Image (cartoon, rainbow, N blue to C red):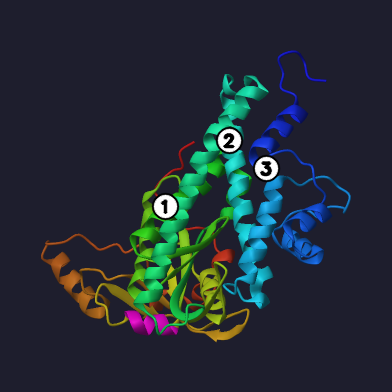
């Protein structure tokens, strides 16, 4: 029993359910199927595909809103807009994405309640908060959804000859170096701050350079871009932002170009696998690109693309990557060395120090090592505690 003045968890749950589900639970699954006019087996498949727990036929867990939702979903499937062969896959994708959104929103709401004693003082106060916030959240979600619809529709109309599911794109992975070790060195609060900061920086950079985030995978971001330059700029800018940010560790990146399969918000194919392998091979602070993308970028003077020694990774026996970085203003190679030496002799320059050796200057045994087996390079910044 809750103490006087405490919130009853059961009472709070029931109140929130009435608000969020549109009424009381009063129907079984079979009753919902009958009232909606949807075949029982079809309603069962849709419920499972949406990611909801299986319920017994005699459990009273559904509301009037469930009847209307099942009826609407069935009408949409029967309209011909969605091919019957992919209707369950579409339903699964919808359930998975909205489930993650709901989890984040509940966490945000509960943080607000627990940190504000006035709001969390009674079940009635919490109920009023949810009733007030829910319509606002729905408005924002609809706005963001429509903006993304407009953006994707614009790209589709701009390139009508392209297959929207299978098209040529640049795929990139950028991940934080030493993340596993980091999780053992910092507490949960600081780790949350680091992940939030990384996600914020990644979102800004990808949007600034016309890319699209496919997903955030913990310490890693997977993105796609329509052009070689956009993909290169995203990887370079993310690396530069991470180096300049005292709260973030170094990052490494792998990029590949080619045809990919886009399906329900995710991407698949050998190009995606290749970008992932390049990332695992990259040293801290470096960006590796495949042969296709290296060729595309070689004609742009703002980039320096250097071939690296072949490496063997899972699925690729002799992968020959190239390193990508911004072109330096001063000449490179033997001519640059002679110019620097002459300037030093005349007292016009101080001895040059290049902390990042070119790939041809790196010993073979270091060149072939993967980033997982190397410690992060020393960094001049210190983490704020």
Would you identify the image quadrant in which residue 179 lies? bottom right
Q: Helix, strand, or loop for circle 2?
A: helix
**Is 172 placed left or right of 44 in the picture?**
left
Would you say the magenta stretch is mainly helix, strand or loop? helix
Residue under the image location 60 percent in, 71 percent down: 79
Residue under the image location 82 percent in, 49 percent down: 28
42 to 57, vertically: above or below? below
Task: State the residue position of label 2.
Answer: 109
Crowd rating for badge 3 (residues with CA inside 10 Å; few <14, some 14–19, many 20+):
some
**Along the polypeptide, which appears first: circle 1 or circle 2?**
2
**Is 4 placed left or right of 333 in the picture?**
right
Instruction: Residue 196: give x, y in percent of width and height.
Output: 50, 46
- In the picture, the disc for residue 86 is none
Nearer mark to the viewer, of 3 and 1: 3
Task: State the residue position of label 3.
Answer: 21
35 to 269, vertically: above or below? above
Residue under the image location 73 percent in, 57 percent down: 36
Residue under the image location 37 percent in, 54 percent down: 241
Instruction: Please check the rendered image and state whether residue 295 is part of the magenta-colored stretch, yes or no.
Output: yes
Task: State the residue position of label 1.
Answer: 201
User: The magenta stretch spans which residues?
Assistant: 291-297
Q: Nearer the viewer, residue 218 or 159?
A: 159
Instruction: Residue 217: give x, y in percent of width and height.
Output: 57, 59
| Tag count | 3
Nearer mark to the viewer, of 1 and 2: 2
Q: Helix, strand, or loop for circle 3?
A: helix
Instruction: Residue 190: give x, y in percent of width and height.
Output: 54, 40
**Along the polypeptide, which appears first: circle 3 or circle 1?**
3
């Amino acid at each position: 029993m809750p103490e006087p003045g405490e919130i009853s968890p059961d009472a709070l749950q029931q109140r929130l359910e009435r608000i969020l589900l549109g009424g009381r639970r009063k129907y079984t699954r079979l009753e919902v199927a009958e009232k909606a006019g949807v075949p029982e087996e079809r309603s069962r498949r849709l419920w499972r595909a949406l990611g909801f727990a299986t319920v017994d036929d005699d459990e009273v867990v559904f509301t009037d809103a469930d009847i209307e939702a099942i009826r609407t979903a069935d009408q949409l499937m029967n309209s011909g807009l969605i091919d019957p062969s992919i209707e369950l896959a579409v339903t699964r994708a919808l359930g998975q994405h909205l489930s993650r959104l709901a989890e984040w929103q509940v966490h945000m709401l509960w943080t607000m309640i627990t940190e504000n004693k006035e709001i969390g003082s009674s079940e009635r106060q919490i109920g009023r908060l949810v009733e007030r916030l829910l319509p606002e959240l729905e408005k924002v979600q609809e706005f963001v959804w429509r903006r993304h619809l407009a953006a994707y529709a614009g790209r589709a109309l701009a390139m009508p000859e392209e297959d929207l599911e299978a098209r040529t794109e640049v795929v990139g992975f950028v991940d934080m170096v030493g993340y596993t070790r980091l999780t053992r060195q910092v507490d949960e609060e600081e780790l949350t701050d680091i992940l939030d900061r990384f996600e914020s920086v990644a979102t800004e950079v990808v949007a600034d350079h016309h890319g699209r985030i496919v997903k955030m995978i913990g310490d890693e971001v997977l993105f796609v871009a329509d052009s070689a330059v956009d993909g290169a700029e995203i990887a370079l800018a993310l690396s530069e932002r991470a180096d300049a940010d005292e709260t973030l560790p170094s990052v490494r990146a792998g990029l590949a170009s080619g045809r990919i399969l886009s399906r329900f918000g995710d991407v698949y194919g050998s190009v995606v696998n290749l970008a992932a392998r390049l990332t695992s091979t990259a040293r801290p602070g470096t960006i590796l690109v495949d042969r296709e993308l290296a060729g595309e970028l070689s004609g742009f003077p703002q980039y320096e693309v250097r071939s690296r020694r072949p490496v063997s990774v899972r699925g690729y026996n002799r992968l020959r990557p190239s390193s990508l970085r911004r072109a330096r203003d001063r000449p490179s190679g033997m001519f640059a060395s002679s110019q620097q030496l002459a300037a030093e002799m005349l007292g016009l320059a101080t001895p040059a120090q290049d902390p990042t050796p070119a790939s041809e200057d790196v010993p073979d045994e270091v060149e072939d090592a993967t980033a997982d087996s190397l410690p992060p390079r020393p960094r001049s910044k210190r983490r704020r505690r």
